Amino acid sequence: MIHLTLAAIGVGPFDTDLLGQALILATPILLAGIGELISERAGVINVGLEGMMLSGAFFAYLATWKTHSLAVGCFAGIGGGLIFGVAMGLVAIEVGADQIVAGVAIDIAALGLTGFLFEQIFTNLPQIVVPTIGNIAIPGLSKIPSFGPALFDHDPLLYLGFLLVPASWFLLYRTKWGLAIRAAGELPMAADSAGISVRRIRWMGVLTAAGLAGLAGADLTIVQVGIFHEDISAGLGYLALVAVIFGRWRSLGVLAAALILGGANALQLRVGEQPYIQGAFWGAIALIFLLVLGYQLLRDRGRAQIPAISVAGLALIAGVVLLATEPHISLSQPLWIGFPYVVALLVLAGSRTSAKMPSALAVPYRRGQG
Amino acid sequence: MTSQARARLLGSGIEVVLMVLVVIVALAIALIFIAAYGVSPGRAISAFYQGAFGNEFDLAGTIAKMIPLSLVALGWIVAFRAGRIQVGFPGQIMVGGIFCSIVALKVGPLPIAIHLPLTIVAGMVGGAAWAWIAAILWAKRGVNEILSTLLLNLVAAQVLDWWVQQPFHDTSSFLPQTLPFPNSALYPTLLANTDLHWDIVVVPIAVVVVAYVLARTTWGFRIRVVGANPQVARHAGISPSAIGTQAMVASGALAGLAGASLVLAGTQTYMGEAFEGGFGFLGIAVALLARNSPWGVLPAALLFAALSQAGEVMAATVNISSQLVGVVQGLMILLVLAATTLLYVRRRRRRRGGPGVSAARAAAEIRGPEVGVAG
């Protein structure tokens, strides 16, 4: 998140535009991630998130084109996610089959279905750009000089995504439902004997994740770009899954992860169009490694963490050297597009979070069979 | 024949019947989609048959498509038997292709007897190396291999894009593609003027090898023990993380072999950006339909190859998008999954077994290698 902090101040390529862009790109990850958080806390992992997002994106686009109504488009997006949510629920909850394989199947089916319908409906038409949901500036706050417009002049779905963070925390930790959700994901048998219907709670979780993933898809087509193309979600659903794991199954954690991944994506778009990598980029990387190094030293004072420390140290030195010399290194655009996914892999590799995982995650529950 | 063996035979008989039913249901749903676009079912079925088996060219195309599908499916089976769900086949195919292009274009000139095997091995090494990243992340850092392989697929797609645009770009072409490979690095054609090449011989060899290794060797036994119950394996002195890593790397090598077939035995002699063609995920569906049996891969791959080949032809003959194959594919996985789980639950209920093995396995799968002990 360092580059976002830098962006708020405005250093080099890290200007407030980058900050605003990062928030926009974090929104679909956040929307789908919060839904997935609730589903996983209830004990169902949903790898089909990507497919649900894609389906939401397509149906939101289709409905907006047909009805010229963005509200209908949003609901169509949610509906597009829910179609596959029902399929997921039937296979994963009612039948009790392997949730992960079911999720992969949903991704494949959604890619096929949206591609098929898109080709059948739109092949002979010129590219249709549908209207997009406009921005609503928050009075007062958006007038703050420098970062005001970047933070407080956005579309309603973005605000909704950020509001869902405290809302999901409240749901999970301060309501009876939240208790039931967490019980269904931790100890379904105990929840069952306490009179909670694990089946119903898990259905709610799956459908929440599916609906929000569909809305995240709608965010892509009828907020961000106004067009649809095959596989437009391009892995954002997987990034949402990463966000839940990296966020240690907490609302705030999911927010932080979504900001990191959205920020990486915004940075990729920004730096990718520069002729060469600017000094500030190397500086930010050096800063990140400096923090990692400090964290390692603080945390493992007694134990030797020599490989990690030496790697972080070497990277730090390299970063400083590159910052000082500012060589004309450039990466080709496809490699920059891959950058957020590499960040996601590093994020996964850097987090040992299994201890916080809901105990019954991905374990089907059948009454009468512990 | 003992009653137990008879029961087992009956059981696998039920499975085969179930799979056939699943295929029929999925195809019927596809027919509904097609009918919605005004093509009568009779015409669709005949167009399907014509497209997949109608003439020598299409039949050869169907058989040629079986090759990458079977190899990927075998790769899935090897990893799955060890309890690992790796879904990184698209990425491993792409990196396999990239490695092939290095050896094909930068090594030589060599006679085909040396150059071709070398190129194929390079493809396998590429696939294995890409799978190894996910394997090592899983074994050392507890990173769920499903997520890491999905992300690695996305990275590989970008690396391939870059590869055919920059370092290996054929500068005489505007398209993102490599220079044509020399003939010494390509599989020779088996049937003139068709897509069928000599790589078809790889399939029976791979099926026999995988079936033999899994069923008859110590390593195969270890894989099966680790997959069935990591705790038991650990007590027996078998390291689940080591075996899991090896199985994933072997799985990636098979995907790399599929990648080699796609670049060295395709319709073109160069490597483009889209050579993977969706075979990586399609192969998973093949393995699931085959009930994770190496021998079952052959009929399942034939079915899916026929679907893809007919899908391509039908796009032209009856104007139905070939993307429909994806819908059928996803549906088949869901239906196979549901049908076999129901069968399995019923059987276990009859046997009055203990706590669900599948539950323990799901937990171990998602928790990564070391943490499984604590759970």
Image (spheres, coloured by chain):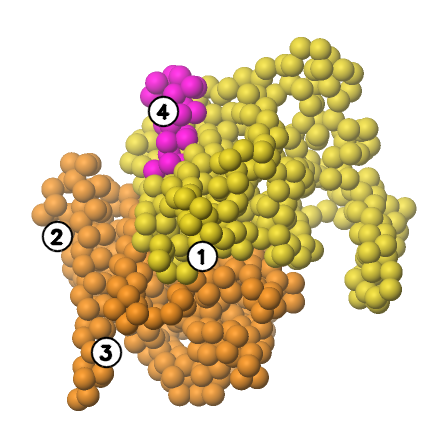
Chain colours: A yellow, B orange
Disc nearest the viewer among 4 and 3? 3
Spatial distance from mark 3 to mark 1, Cα to Cα? Answer: 27 Å
Q: Amino acid at mark 1?
A: Val
Spatial distance from mark 4 to mark 1, Cα to Cα? Answer: 37 Å
Q: Amino acid at mark 2?
A: Ser
Instruction: Count neighbours of disc 4 (C-alpha within 10 A) and say few if under 14, some if 14 to 19, many if 20 or more.
Output: many
For disc 4, the marked residue is A63
Location of residue B62 in the rendering, given as x and y in whole percent from the top left corner: 26, 63
Residue found farthest to the left: B42
Location of residue A286 in the rendering, given as x and y in whole percent from the top left corner: 83, 48
For disc 2, the marked residue is B46
Labels 1 and 2 within one chain: no
- Residue A315 in magenta stretch: no
Which residue is at the front of the view, B289 or A328?
B289
Which residue is at the front of the view, B59 or A176?
A176
Q: Of callouts 4 and 1, which one flags the residue occurring earlier in the amino acid sequence?
A: 4
Disc nearest the viewer among 4 and 1? 1
Q: Amino acid at mark 3?
A: Arg
Spatial distance from mark 1 to mark 2, Cα to Cα? Answer: 44 Å
Instruction: Count neighbours of disc 2 (C-alpha within 10 A) and say few if under 14, some if 14 to 19, many if 20 or more.
Output: few
* Disc ID at residue A52: none
Q: Amino acid at mark 4?
A: Ala
